[in-house]
Image: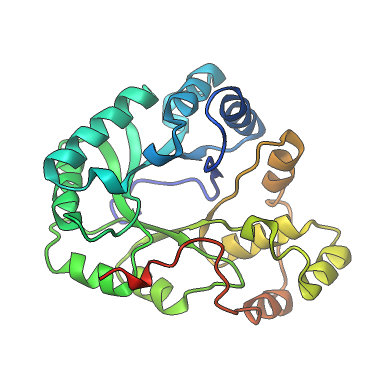
Amino acid sequence: MANGVTMPPMGFGTYRLREGEECRKAVLHALQVGYRLIDTAAMYGNEEDVGWAIRESGIPRKEIFVTTKLWNDDHGYEQALRAFERSEHRLNVEYIDLYLIHWPVMRARDRSWVALERIYRDGRCRAIGVSNYTIKHLEQLSSLAEVMPMVEQIELTPFLQQRDLVDHCRQLGMVLQAYSPLTRAKMFGDKFLVEMSQRLERTPAQILLRWSMQKGFVPLPRSSRPERIEENFRIFDFQLERDDMDRLDSLESNSRVSWDPSGVP
């Protein structure tokens, strides 16, 4: 990242992992498989379970990168500071590596960013960033920020490449994390993806994750099934050829599986 903090090349997402045993087992298994970036959020309702799995793993804390996020109901300077403290308490993992504003809601988001700057300057998290910000939102933030976001987390797949936003983030020196990198399996039946999967003897998920990494993104796949968690991690022993990358790039269709933030002023 721009501040010199390093981030693993792929993470494990926890959205929609049910709190309790499902989340604990999934995160613990992901850590045992080799994942070292765990992405959670106050809204997911599973920060306590993520923290439990990290402690239970026995892996040194410094080897794990933990991300959590400020939810929409907690915007505002004092509110954001209190929300961060609640996340700290629930996670109970010594420190938080990355704290993000989850969505660019109108209400007091500028004051929330000032709070994140304070949290960062006070050394309570190693990096700060945003999620789901458009170019417009980033330009607005640039006009007031003393510390610019180090990370932008957005939906990124071959079917939704957001090229202008990606270019803008990179000009600002931001790392791009890709959520829903597997399209929630909605595009696994794409004709070209199926053909490539058969030809390379790789799953559609592995191909999508490899595309993401080769584009320079940090993908955040999620699964509760041990075999899928393992399968998604097996992407470091192959590369996609240039022709295949070009074909995947050609699949752009502005197809989202999550909410579109472009309508937020």
Taking depth in this image into account, of 195 and 121 the one nearest to the observer is 195
Identified at 62% across, 28% down, the residue is 22
The C terminus, quarter of image: bottom left
Q: Name the quarter where the N terminus is drawn.
A: bottom left
Front residue of 157/77: it is 77
Residue visible at 55% across and 49% down in the picture: 10
Figure disc tally: 0
Residue 149 seen in the figure: yes
- Relative image position of residue 192 (x, y in whole percent): 78, 75
- State left or right for residue 144 relative to residue 134: left
Q: Position of residue 27 (x, y in %)?
A: 57, 31
Q: Residue at x 81, y 69 (%)?
A: 196
Is 73 left or right of 224, judged from the image as shown?
A: left
Question: In this rendering, does residue 124 appear at all?
Answer: no
Residue in the picture at 36% in, 24% down: 90
Q: Quadrant of residue 41?
A: top left
Give the image location of residue 135, x and y in percent. Answer: 31, 73
Name the residue nearer the viewer: 128 or 15.
15
Q: Is residue 208 left or right of residue 163?
A: right
> How far across and down, in percent of the image, does residue 114 sit?
14, 50
Asked if residue 70 is positioned above or below residue 33 in the image, the reply reads below
Along the horizontal axis of the image, is 204 left or right of 263? Answer: right
Colour scheme employed for the rendering of this structure: rainbow
